[in-house]
Image (spheres, rainbow, N blue to C red):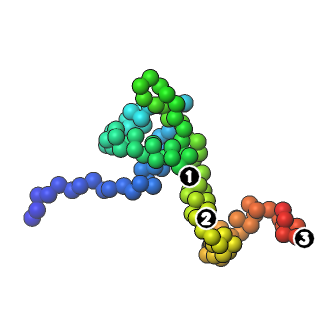
């Protein structure tokens, strides 16, 4: 029998970003990275939290303002907003947007397709809302 300690499950970047955004949304205003680290239970290194916040800043999901010698962070959007930005970035990287969008819509589950059509609103005679 082996006496190896079980290593903690490694979380993916997207999962960590979601946790950090959730913590920021619980704040009552801009907060330092140390506050986020404590809110997440302290199992992440401070440098890891700062790296995640910086990535979120690059993605436009958070803003930061000077607070002494460091920064205070604020969420710009929620998890849905972050997912939408990722989808938009992928679409922007494609040359045939029409084909990508058509393929996306036809790959949706029927309930999701119905929801998307509701969100887009009724189309007029020339295909315009």
Q: Is residue 13 above or below residue 106?
A: above
**Quadrant in which residue 93 is drawn:** bottom right
Q: How far across and how far down the image is residue 35, in percent?
A: 41, 32
Q: Secondary structure at mark 2?
A: helix
Q: How far across and how far down the image is residue 58, in percent?
A: 51, 47
Which label sits in the foreground, 1 or 2? 2
Residue at left offset 47%, top offset 25%: 67
Question: Of residues 31 and 92, which is closer to you in this image?
Answer: 92
Can residue 22 be seen here? The reply is no
- Distance, label 2 to label 3, CA atoms, is 27 Å
Looking at the image, is mark 1 or mark 2 earlier in the sequence?
1
- Say which residue label 3 marks: 125
Can residue 84 be seen here? The reply is yes
Q: Residues within 10 Å of mark 2 (few under 14, many from 20)?
A: some
Q: Is residue 50 above or below residue 18?
A: above
Question: Of residues 71 and 3, which is closer to you in this image?
Answer: 71
- Say which residue label 2 marks: 91
């Amino acid at each position: 029998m082996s006496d190896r300690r079980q290593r903690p499950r490694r979380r993916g970047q997207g999962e960590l970003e979601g946790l950090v955004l959730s913590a920021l949304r619980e704040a009552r205003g801009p907060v330092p990275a140390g506050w986020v680290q404590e809110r997440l239970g302290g199992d992440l290194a401070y440098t890891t939290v700062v790296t995640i916040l910086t990535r979120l800043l690059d993605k436009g999901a958070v803003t930061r303002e000077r607070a002494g010698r460091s920064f205070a962070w604020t969420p710009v959007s929620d998890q849905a907003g972050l997912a939408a930005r990722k989808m938009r970035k992928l679409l922007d990287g494609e040359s045939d947007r029409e084909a990508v969008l058509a393929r996306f819509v036809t790959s949706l589950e029927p309930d999701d397709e119905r929801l998307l059509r509701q969100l887009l609103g009724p189309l007029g005679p020339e295909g315009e809302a």
